[in-house]
Amino acid sequence: MTQFLQQLTNGVVLGATYGLIALGYTMVYGIIQLINFAHGDIFMLGAFGGLALYDVLPHGMQDQIVIALPLCTLAGIALSVAVAVVMERVAYRPLRNAPRLAPLITAIGVSAMIEEGTRLWYPGAKAPLDFPQLLPSGAVTVGGVRISYASIVVVVVAVVLMIALQAFVLRSRTGRAMRATAQDPDTAKLMGINTDRVIVITFVLGAALAAVAGVLQGARLGTVRFDDGFIAGLKAFTAAVLGGIGNITGCVAGGFILGIVEVMAVQYLPSGSGYKDLWAFVVLILVLVFKPNGLFGEEVTVRA
Amino acid sequence: MTSAFLRIFDRYREQILRRTGPRGRVLLIAGVVLCLISSVLPWGVSGVGYTNPLGGNLQSVGIGGPRLYVLLLTLVACVGLTSVDGRRRSSLAASLGNLIISVYILRGLVHEGGGTGAVGVGAWVALVGSLVLFLGADTLPVTPRNVLPRLSAVADIALIFVVIGVGLAALVVGLDIEDDKQFVAFAIFVVALVVAANGLGVAAAFTSAFDRYRYIGYAVAAAAAFAFPFTQHGNAQWMAVFARVGVFAAAAIGLNVVVGLAGLLDLGYIAFFGIGGYVSALLSNAVFTTVHVHLPFLLVIPLGAAVAAFFGVLVGAPTLRLRGDYLAIVTLGFGEIFRIVAINWTGLTKGPNGIAGIPDLKLPGGFDFGKPHTVFGQLLPFQSNYYFLDIFLIAGVMVFFARVNDSRIGRAWVAIREDELAARAMGINTVALKLLAFGIGATLAGTAGTINVHIGEAIEPNAYQFIFSALLLSAVVLGGMGTVAGPILGAALLYAIPEKLRFVQDYRLFLFGLALILLMRFRPEGLIVSRRRQREFHEGGSGADAMSQPGQVAPV
């Protein structure tokens, strides 16, 4: 039982990261029906942005987690957001009215460019890089379950951000514009909404959340690699589909469910760890077969 | 309001059309003269030089290597002095080619000679000359592409021979160039020449000739493909590369059925290729096999294809009912599942080590693919055997593709791709047909995969990563979606160029990413264009344009 609870905790921590990344997929998909393959790489860039800033911080500040963590997170957000905005402007926007296949293929190209660009030009990135200890060390033990402070920070930050995003989308004027654009871009435009701006904001929000996830994941695992974004992105996408793509609450739930499923599968299935990355895809295929709209999704109207 | 706008637009157009005046002509002539002079002057000073198979070296007076390219491109640029349609495009392409070559060589000289001291007078003259030429060409009026008059059957057939022959010659010459810089200069030359020829209507004339004498065209192309090994003087290096290229080309044509015809984005395509490969590796008594069965290869091919097809249907059946982009992500997931299982199921696949020592193919008549054979008095390395096998495979796949493309099924696929709802309303069983396309793609990939492992003599899971699916996809996109010849051209370019330019290899994936983005943005129809695609990608404004540019139409 203790082992089960321990794994459950680990799953929640993992799921928080998936959920944060998945929000970017779900928002972009909700608004322009594009699977942004490069989103996983935006997540990876967040970690590298944080790492880059950490390396230039003076030694006194490097040791102060309270200063270093927020600064590195901001740097990660800055890098991810900058790349996401350029990507949207240069690669996706010109293809807004192209056949559906075109932006998908472009997204694959963008993903390859970000990954390879990082590998080629970030100093030392051809091998995994060490990520600094930015999260508090130590742990509390509750009923035999060990919960590290790092995990607590990750989950708390993730949950706060998710709630904030939900509030933003539901309450703010921009959030309303986003929902209007998602429902019907043409009508939204007629109502005076600058849809191009809304789409950029969507990319910015998604990238910022992914960057936070990237820095937190890097700090928790202590290592980053140029191709971290590929598998993480796929799993996050699975989480988004699981929760019903386009649905923010569902997406968060999907992230947690997926994280827990993965951890449990590794723990309780034979030769689990070798197949660690497999379960997300199995879940994805099962969901698409039996509940294509996701667990919490509404009926998706098919656009011709 | 609109009419006022149109009037202004018309006046602007007229100004453009009247733009070449004496000034442009003077610039053009000056550029031509300077470039011609530069092509005989020495480009280098001493110590640094590019020797080349075309003779001459850069330090002495004479023509050779890049100087020959500049000379030829300058002669092409002279078309700007005539009044032929498309002269602007051709002249610009040629002069731009000159400019890039001279800048590139200049940079190389400075780099290797340690400063501008190593640069000879010829290189400077070439730089100035091609710049002047470019400015002169830029003053030429915008005209539609040239349409060559149709001459006679003999001329048409001669054109087919000449174009394919020149293509083969360019390939052979290019592969013979050992030096990287020489090769890059040559490649720029070829690209500039092709664009210039395209502007003058050569491509259009070739495609219409090919359309008219299709069987002669295919026969000539096949003859050129068969002749290629004989140009390599028994050298195995390029035969090994092209044996691989052929297999990938066959797989790319299969992917083209899925992506180009039915419009389904399959991102796990390499998995089917791998499944065929594993079936073949396990059943052909490899040294490290885990299944001690040795079936004749002619039986293994259909088996590998069938197993791949089975998995294709298994993945496709549930997901094809959904929207297209879900298929992309599910196939991607399937590709990863395949790789993860291949890594972990060590009892069958030997895990990450893979299965090595796969024997060469042997045909029932006793023909051994692992031995060199003498053909027409020339000893061909054993890799040529696989190359020839590839040609038969590709020919078969091409015939299949062309036939299915022209059938009811092919038209139904295109209808689904264009508008699935409308297709369904017209009574097309969309799910069944999509599944058919997906299954055919998997089958073709499996077939190519069975041969692939025999060429490489080993199989390991990491040769089947996602990125290789993306590479095959780029081959299809680059060559031209929905065309027969496109994927072959794309595969040849994408797999052979990194082999030729070793320094590109590390940047290969980065450049592919960039190429995908640029292609989708500026030329989504690819190098070879299918009539249908052209209209789809340029709907509205330039739709009529596509009709008036026969040069853009592929012989499909």
Image (cartoon, coloured by chain):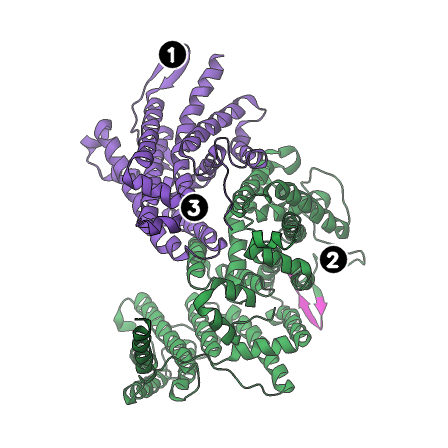
Chain colours: A purple, B green
Q: Nearer the viewer, mark 2 or mark 1?
A: 1
Instruction: Using the image, determine if residue A220 lies above or below residue B411.
Output: above
Quarter residue B31 falls in: bottom left
Chain at numbered mark 2: B
Q: Amino acid at mark 3?
A: Asn
Looking at the rendered structure, the secondary structure element under dot 2 is: loop
The residue under label 2 is B368
Chain at numbered mark 3: A
Q: Residues within 10 Å of mark 2 (few under 14, many from 20)?
A: some
Q: Nearer the viewer, mark 1 or mark 3?
A: 3
The residue under label 1 is A142
Residue appearing at x 59%, y 42% in the figure: B319
How many angstroms separate mark 1 from mark 3 (CA)? 40 Å
The magenta span reads B374-383
Instruction: Using the image, determine if residue A109 lies above or below residue A284.
Output: below
Which is more N-terminal, label 3 or label 1?
Answer: 3
Residue B444 seen in the figure: yes
Q: Residue A294 in the image: x percent, y percent? A: 51, 34
Looking at the rendered structure, the secondary structure element under dot 3 is: loop
Q: Residues within 10 Å of mark 3 (few under 14, many from 20)?
A: many
Q: Amino acid at mark 1?
A: Val
How many angstroms separate mark 2 from mark 1 (CA)? 70 Å
Q: Residues within 10 Å of mark 1 (few under 14, many from 20)?
A: few
Chain at numbered mark 1: A
Residue B381 part of the magenta segment? yes
| Badge number at residue A36 | 3
| Circles 2 and 1 on the same subunit | no
The residue closer to the viewer here, A257 or B98, is A257
Relative to A15, A189 lies left or right: left
Residue appearing at x 42%, y 40% in the figure: A25
Residue B414 part of the magenta segment? no
